[in-house]
Image (cartoon, grey):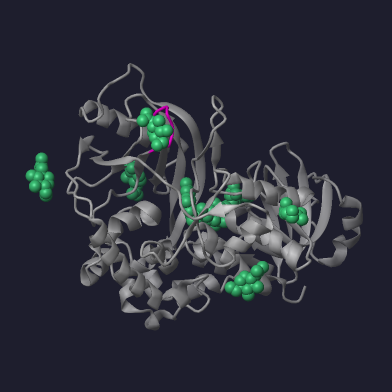
């Protein structure tokens, strides 16, 4: 990790901004063309392309000890079998297949799942008398939804560079999604839209259609009309792609590091990264690429200016957590989905909630859990949602008490902020243009889900669209 220092110190004067090292004990200073913060989907992808395809030197700062962000392959220590407790599947979008093949990671398009699905209201613990849309109803609804979403595809993907200004935003995108769904008679698609990708918005009925479509864009809708594809990693280890990215990037990644201070000007940046081991590194770079969710608290170390604070303070976000649990009382091969008691296709629980106990293809009652909370729900709070929901189901007699033991955690992960969004009023007033006006401001560029779609491979494609702008003039 600490290699290359000698040669890079020579170039350290390229960026003519004052050193931050005066007040902090810095053990090394390096200089790069681009410093990237966040080695999740968008950041790790960008790191590969900026260095390998554009020939620019990089440093990538990642908080965790591995790359991949929401990818969370957990290996059962008892059996050695891997389970995907984060990202499961990759939409075939943009250059995704090329990126997998570049790293010799085989992907295929179908994955058989054989589980039963049941519906319960986790706030009361009772089964919900839920009538699932028939396959024909769902297909018809997705055909309509895909057509509607395709009207806006070019202005929304891979990013919002060409999104219409305030008064030109299509009215439909500003409708509450419940009204939109009723207007076009697409109710039968909504349970899938929520379950697969828009769950982080909570109760979809009252969300602006724009944000639902950002979570469930046209290319994903086409998967449900038979015109699009989802990719699965053949090894059943999604982490494989990022482990190979990791091997390639080598010492250019600073793992278990976060930025603690930064100085940014229109001529370049200087950031101080600090590792969990206490080591500090001062990185001078001509450009900064921020690939973590752009919330005010995440960006606090970057010393946001008035313009940045003014724009980013308009956002709210959802906190996402996930993990695995086991209990002999959770029926094997049965997924229990949290549903509103009404059984209505447009009703979903309000934030904060547990989405489901999703059966993992395991012989041992393993279930995946995914929790979505408002800004106040921390790790303990999200675990609490899983434990309380379980208790409710047991107390209501919905889960038959088969074994004496309760619920045990196998694995838990904090996935940080998702669905970074502004309110309808700000959206109508031109928030998207304001947000995008930050691209390039103070040598700082941005990538990630908040700028494109809440899906893995569209954020890769968004990085493809940022990089030429980012490296211009380097
Ligand atoms: C549980 C879960 C399951 C998902 N499943 C799917 C799926 O099956 N298919 C799909 O298409 N999409 C899925 N998504 C959505 C998709 O994975 C995300 O939208 C995508 O990862 C977003 O990419 P990103 O680069 O914006 O953020 P991330 O991939 O989350 O990357 C952010 C990175 O920044 C790091 N980081 C955060 N803060 C700091 C800091 N201060 N300093 C340094 N590093 C920091 C994080 O550790 C992380 O590596 C899922 C999301 C979640 C949360
Ligand atoms: C990614 O796709 C775009 C077009 O969608 C293309 O212009 C670009 O060259 C591709 N990049 C790579 C690395 O293949
Ligand atoms: C992928 O395989 C090719 C051919 O076997 C090899 O040349 C290349 O180095 C491999 N790349 C990676 C990233 O493993
Ligand atoms: C469940 O819903 C169906 C269809 O709406 C209805 O016919 C049935 O009586 C309901 N059952 C119960 C137990 O409420
Ligand atoms: C956030 O979620 C918690 C837990 O569900 C809830 O108690 C609280 O009222 C919510 N706060 C807001 C502002 O919605
Ligand atoms: C669950 O399903 C998997 C695959 O279909 C099977 O191997 C396993 O035995 C099943 N478990 C139980 C308890 O039925």
Tell me if I can see residue 290 in this picture: no
Q: Is residue 337 left or right of residue 313?
A: left
Residue 364 forms part of the magenta stretch: yes
* Residue 270 at x, y percent in the picture: 75, 59
Q: Quadrant of residue 278?
A: top right
* Most foreground residue, 23 or 408: 408
Residue 125 drawn in magenta: no
- The C terminus lies in which quarter of the figure? bottom right
Instruction: Say whether residue 420 is left or right of residue 24.
Output: left
Quarter of the render that holds ligand 6: top left
The location of residue 148, given as percent across then percent down, is 34, 74
Left or right: 347, with 417 as reference point: left
Q: Residue at x 50, y 66 (%)?
A: 452
Closer to the camera, 202 or 155? 155
The furthest residue to the bottom: 168
Point 69% across, 38% down: residue: 276
Q: Name the residue nearer the viewer: 245 or 277.
A: 245
Is residue 458 shown above or below 253?
below
State the extent of the magenta-drawn residues as a range: 359-365
Main SS class of the magenta portion in the image: loop
Quadrant for the N terminus in the image: top right
Q: Is residue 279 above or below residue 48?
A: above
Q: Residue at x 29, y 59 (%)?
A: 190
Q: Position of residue 280 (x, y in %)?
A: 76, 45
- Residue 421 screen position, x and y as percent: 43, 62
Q: How many marks?
A: 0
């Amino acid at each position: 990790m600490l290699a290359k220092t000698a040669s890079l110190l020579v170039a350290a004067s390229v960026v003519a901004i004052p050193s931050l090292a005066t007040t902090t004990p810095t053990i090394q200073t390096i200089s790069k063309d681009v410093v990237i913060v966040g080695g999740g989907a968008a950041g790790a992808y960008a790191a590969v392309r900026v260095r390998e395809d554009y020939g620019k030197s990089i440093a990538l700062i990642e908080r965790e000890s591995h790359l991949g962000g929401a990818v969370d392959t957990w290996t059962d220590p008892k059996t050695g079998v891997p389970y995907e407790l984060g990202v499961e599947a990759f939409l075939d979008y943009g250059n995704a297949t090329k990126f997998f093949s570049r790293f010799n990671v085989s992907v295929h398009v179908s994955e058989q799942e054989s589980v039963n699905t049941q519906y319960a209201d986790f706030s009361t613990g009772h089964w919900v008398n839920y009538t699932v849309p028939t396959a024909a109803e769902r297909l018809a609804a997705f055909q309509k939804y895909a057509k509607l979403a395709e009207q806006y595809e070019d202005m929304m993907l891979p990013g919002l560079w060409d999104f219409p200004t305030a008064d030109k935003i299509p009215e439909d995108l500003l409708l509450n999604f419940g009204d939109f769904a009723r207007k076009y008679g697409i109710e039968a698609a909504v349970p899938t839209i929520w379950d697969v990708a828009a769950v982080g918005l909570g109760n979809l009925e009252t969300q602006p259609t724009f944000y639902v479509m950002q979570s469930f864009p046209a290319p994903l809708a086409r998967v449900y009309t038979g015109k699009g594809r989802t990719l699965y990693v053949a090894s059943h280890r999604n982490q494989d792609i990022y482990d190979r990215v990791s091997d390639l990037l080598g010492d250019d990644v600073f793992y278990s590091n976060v930025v603690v201070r930064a100085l940014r000007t229109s001529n370049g940046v200087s950031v101080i990264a600090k590792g969990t081991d206490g080591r500090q590194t001062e990185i001078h770079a001509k450009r900064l690429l921020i690939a973590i969710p752009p919330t005010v608290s995440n960006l606090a170390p970057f010393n946001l200016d008035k313009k940045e604070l003014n724009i980013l303070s308009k956002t709210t976000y959802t906190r996402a957590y996930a993990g695995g649990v086991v209990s002999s009382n959770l029926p094997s091969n049965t997924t229990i989905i949290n549903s509103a008691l009404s059984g209505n296709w447009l009703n979903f629980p309000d934030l904060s909630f547990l989405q489901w106990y999703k059966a993992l293809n395991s012989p041992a009652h393993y279930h995946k859990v995914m929790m979505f909370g408002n800004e106040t729900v921390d790790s303990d709070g999200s675990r609490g949602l899983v434990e309380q929901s379980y208790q409710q189901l047991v107390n209501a007699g919905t889960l038959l008490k088969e074994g004496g033991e309760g619920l045990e955690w196998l694995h838990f992960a904090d996935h940080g902020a998702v669905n970074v969004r502004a309110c309808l009023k700000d959206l109508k007033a031109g928030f998207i243009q304001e947000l995008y006006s930050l691209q390039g401001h103070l040598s700082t560029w941005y990538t990630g889900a908040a700028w494109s779609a809440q899906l893995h491979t569209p954020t890769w494609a968004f990085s493809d669209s940022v990089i030429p702008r980012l490296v211009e003039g380097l």
